[in-house]
Image: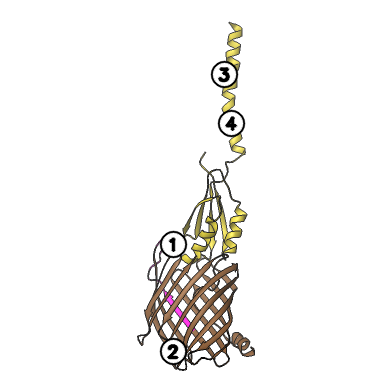
Amino acid sequence: MKVLLIILMLSSTALAAEPATKAAKTETAPLPASGVIISVKGMVCSFCAQGIEKKLKAFKEVKSVNVDLDTKKVDVQFVAGQNLATEKIQETIKNAGYDVTDVKILRPLQ
Amino acid sequence: MLNLIASLFLSLLLHAHPVTYEDGLMLKSMAREDMSETSVTYTFAPRFAVGLEYDRLEMNQLETSWGLLELNALVKRWNGEHSQANIYLLTGAGGYWNDQQATSFAGKLGLQADYETRRFYTLGSYTTWQSEDVESYYALYRVGYAPFVAGYYDLNVWVIAQFDYNPDMRSEVQVTPFLRFFYKNVLWEMGASLRGNLYWQFMVHL
């Protein structure tokens, strides 16, 4: 009986410790980006934005591109499980003739 | 050639963005009573575009035609928080012919400057045209206002006034008020000069 109690205590401690380890892992390794929001300087007309949208949509990693001329922001959503380096996105926008002022990386809710 | 270069440096200030974005293709067609222009332009590098252009201009009671291979350059761009300004260099070389059967080598050289916000737009350009029997220039100035600010996924409307002058086409500045509409990658303009000269332009970015 004593041995049974000890086994029960040990197994319950081990079960309780497992979720804590998982939680620690998620804190140190953030989930991959699901997209980025880019602030673009000089994007004042639809013709400008159309170039940016077309160039970004050409990447296979990009699922959708949404342009907001009011806020001068471009919302780029990635295909699930895929990612595109922010440097590549910045370079693409620069080559389209515009300046990137800010990049905000979006991560899925945990 | 010296005249062309001199004209370039003396000039200050044509239409649309002659260089778009890398790998961008632009088709353009413009017409009015005394001139028409049809072009296809391909931007092969962030600051350079090549194109083919056919222009028809009535000069000195002659119907002149110009078929040119274009090379346009974005010389300088200023991206502001709520504005953009550009300077472009426009060049072209090819052939000239008129309804009197005259043909010769022809060239075009020009500068364009523009500034725009989401409410205000202005553009100036100066282009010289040269062939064996024609030496002319074309100056154009535009100022426009958007009555409402539209989003990227909405129809954009502008009210624009154009002032253009070519001494070989008419002795006075032609004033043309017109409306500009654009939706995403398609732009069209429609209007008429104060003398009733109808004008339209269509442009698409591919």
Q: Are marks 3 and 1 in contact (CB under 8 Å)?
A: no
Q: Does label 4 lie on the same chain as label 2?
A: no
- Residue at mark 1: B152
- Residue at mark 2: B173
Image disc number at residue A12: 3
Q: Residue at x 61, y 90 (%)?
A: B3
Which secondary structure, mark 4?
helix
- Gap between marks 3 and 1, in whole Å? 58 Å
- Residue at mark 4: A22
* Disc 3 residue type (three-letter): Ser
* Disc 4 residue type (three-letter): Lys
Q: Position of residue B62 (x, y in %)?
A: 47, 92
- Gap between marks 1 and 2, in whole Å? 35 Å
Q: Does label 2 lie on the same chain as label 1?
A: yes
Q: How many marks?
A: 4
* Disc 1 residue type (three-letter): Tyr
Q: Is residue A44 visible?
A: no
B181 to A52, vertically: above or below: below
